[in-house]
Image (cartoon, rainbow, N blue to C red):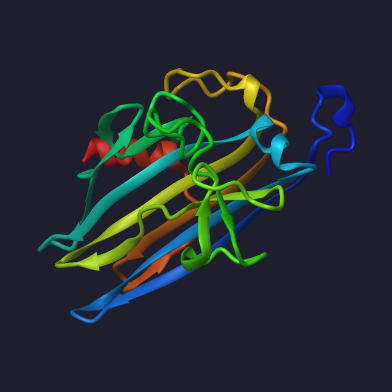
Amino acid sequence: MNKDCAKNDTCSLKRLTLIVKNYEVGFADDPYPSYGNASVVEYETDSVESLEKYAVVQFIMGGVFYSSKNANGKIEKNIGTVVGSFGENVQFFFQEWVIDSYDLDPVYNSNPDDGRFYYLRWNKVPGSYESRTRQYYGAEKPNSPIVYLTDYPSGAFVTGPGAVNAAMKFKTCLYKAGDVPAKTVRSDINFAKPIACFEWQNIYMFDFDTGKFKTDKVDIPALFKELNHN
């Protein structure tokens, strides 16, 4: 990748990868498991010093909603969840693409106290993403110039007479760190041109007829209108 790196001064970037895995988590006191997709974005540079030349920014569309079937057999849906976004709690369903960040810095997993890069991860076991051998970049620099970030979006599960559903799309992008503003608003999705992006989804919507979660693609804006109409 990055064949034209000289044009945008990114030749120190050697690799960018995204891994997406689906998971199913069961609990001893609950007969219904939780379903979802998780991701790992990883990049490699030519030196440890070059790692901070780049920054991951993630975008999200959609969110979480609750669905149930009433006594007349009608499916009712509503948004009842909030999420931390740009320093405030907001309704967890975005009709359009927004920056996925808890604070005002668009960089994914940044922290206003610890900075942009502290929570980049690296692993003592090469090729592993296990938390037991994970290290934070800000606490200790890696020997090899490879770092990664993980995302475990809200999952979907059956609860009571209904279900909590996940309907999210993501774009995970890598930028030159200097191109990413220190502060912005969640709607500022065109702040700079990314080096590269990956798209993935976390969609698990309960089908009351089959009793199973469907993972088909979803028209998020149309679903948003349906949720707000209800």
Q: 11 and 91: which one is in front?
A: 11
Instruction: Give me the residue at 42% from left, 19% from top.
Output: 185
- What percent of the width, then of the height, locates residue 100? 45, 35
Asked if residue 174 is positioned above or below residue 139 in the image, the reply reads above
* Count of numbered circles in the view: 0
On screen, residue 222 versus residue 192, left or right, reads left
Quadrant where the N terminus sits is: top right
Tell which of 70 and 192 is nearer to you: 192
Residue 175 placement: quadrant: top right
Vertical position of residue 10 compared to residue 159: above or below: above
Residue at horizontal 58 percent and vertical 22 percent from the top: 180
Q: Hey, which quadrant is residue 84 in on the image?
A: top left
For the residue pair 84 and 136, the one nearer the viewer reads as: 136
For residue 122, above or below residue 127: above
* Residue at the spot 68% in from the left edge and 24% down from the top edge: 193
On the rendered structure, is 66 left or right of 36? Answer: left
Q: Is residue 160 visible to us here?
A: yes
